[in-house]
Image (cartoon, rainbow, N blue to C red):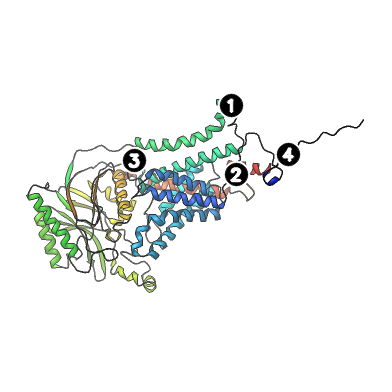
Amino acid sequence: MVQEKTAAPARSAGPAGGPARSGTPGRVRLPRPGTAGRAAGAVAGGLLLFLAFPPLGLWFLAPPGAASLMLAVHGARPRNALGLGFAAGAAFLAPGLHWVSPIGTDAWLGLVALESLFYAAWAVGAALVSRLPLWPLWASALWVAAEWARGVLPFGGFPWARVAFSQGESVFTPYAALGGAPLVSFAVVLCGGLAASAVLRLAAALRRGAPLARPLTLPVLLPVLLPVLLPLAGAPALAVAALAVPRPADEGGTVKVGVVQGNVPGRGMNPLGDEPAVVLGNHTRMLHEMARAVREGRMPRPDLVVLPENSTDIDPYRSDLAHRAIDEAVKDIGVPVLVGAVVGVGENGRATRSLVWDPRTGPGAYYDKRKLVPFGEYTPLKDLVLALSERAGLVGKQSVPGTRDGDLRLGPVTVGAVNCYEVAFDDVVGGTARTGAGLLVVQTNNATYALTNLPAQQLAMSQLRAVEHNRAVITAAITGISASVTPAGTIAWRTGELVPAMNVLTVPIRTAQTVATRVGALPEWAVTLAGAGALAAAVRRRPSRSEGTGPERQDERRAGEE
């Protein structure tokens, strides 16, 4: 009797007619991102961050942007993460800092390349800490550390385009009253990190053959969905929690502030024009017009008036013409005026000055700008840079930084003077707020960058500073955007750009300090040190190339062994 051999069951053909790999019932095959996929995610994340910033102001796109960046670098090798981070930074900053282009395309692209290095460094750190428990927390802390570094290096730092500055008026803005701009950035990026964690956990569950196709009973689904739902729920919870941040109440005091935006004759690199005293004449003429409107009852009488940075293009200390023109206009309005002037210091220096001009006693107390614009107000590495570029010579006399906070008494109130570029620096604004000033005044000259995205970005910074320090903020810009921001961060009044404008505004006066004002840089340092500690731990436990970097990577390795 011949025994029949049992035929082995035929394997179903795989793709291209080859044998199919044995699979686990219920397993969902998901494509894993390759280098191109990661690069696309990094660039998409950078573009989403750009869209979150003014003038578009789609602030709600910042967390998805951060999530896309987190997904792009999660589990990546450090050298790959370096390129991904640089690509993300360039995609974000090339359009975000396009306002630099009036100076020159080379200056714009050079700045973008320099600042993108900080995002490359963050990406390496984020990739390393992605193998740790609670990795979204550590990656977000490293983001704050990278923003801190950008605000310090090089040449005094360039803290523009921090994530917090996309949240001038959003659900995340209240965190500014608790921990300043660093805490706002941390909260936004952490929301993105939690969303990214949920996506990765869901993908890992599907690859493991999670029983999603079986009867959907709670005992079966709970172990699968709980790790996904917890981080996913954490993101909106973090946003909603900002509403519970305590903020000081209205104290009832007000002051009437006149604001003048005189406009300039030129554009681009020569905004003040070639004819002297035109800008001075624009602003003194509008002061006289304001005085006439007050006398005729068309405007309320102000308690003080604020002119923008560079509201006189002639040094009133050294020019009798400028001194007389300003003095006559101030006497006409009859109240103290904060004049923005560039004045000579010694033989070869200058200072950007906020100068109190009293109708009776003339020029008095002043504040000199402390944070100077590199290559705009002074030239770092002067001899080398001047040898390499003739354009660097346009800086002219080198500016000298001030040495004191900007608290200045104007009539019935002490104002905190902040000058243009300084509004991006936490220490300058915080130090001035801690002097007890009842409102903050930002004098600015954005004439070179008119009709770019800079004026709107700078106004969003003023909104965040208002909430951070519980102070109204008055912005006086030479070409716009001049504005009044309430302590809640709401824009109560604003001008257009490249038009003369003036108004007298009733502004609340506050004296109570927020937690953020009192603690200063402490939250930033705490978060930065936490990120640095996590990075050190990740480096110490860094696995070999053959080892995994987390549950998702271990799942991929198991799938490859089947």
- Specify the farthest residue to the bottom: 387
Residue 174's disc is: 3
Q: Position of residue 520 (x, y in %)?
A: 34, 47
The amino acid type found where label 2 is placed reads Arg
Q: Quadrant of residue 402?
A: bottom left
Which dot, 1 or 2, sits closer to the camera? 1
- Specify the farthest residue to the left: 296
Quadrant for the N terminus in the image = top right
In terms of depth relative to the viewer, which is nearer, 275 or 519? Answer: 275
Label 4 sits on a secondary structure element that is loop
In terms of depth relative to the viewer, which is nearer, 5 or 319? Answer: 5
Q: Is residue 206 left or right of residue 114?
A: right
Which dot, 3 or 1, sits closer to the camera? 1
Which dot, 3 or 2, sits closer to the camera? 2
Q: Is residue 95 visible?
A: yes
Q: Position of residue 221 (x, y in %)?
A: 56, 29
**Count of residue discs:** 4
Q: Which residue is mark 2?
A: 553
Of labels 1 and 2, earlier in sequence is 1
Residues tagged 3 and 4 counted as in contact (Cβ below 8 A): no
Label 3 sits on a secondary structure element that is helix
Question: How many C-alpha atoms fall within 10 Å of the one at disc 1: few (<14), some, or many (≥20)?
Answer: few
Q: Which residue is mark 1?
A: 215
Which dot, 3 or 4, sits closer to the camera? 4
Which dot, 4 or 1, sits closer to the camera? 4
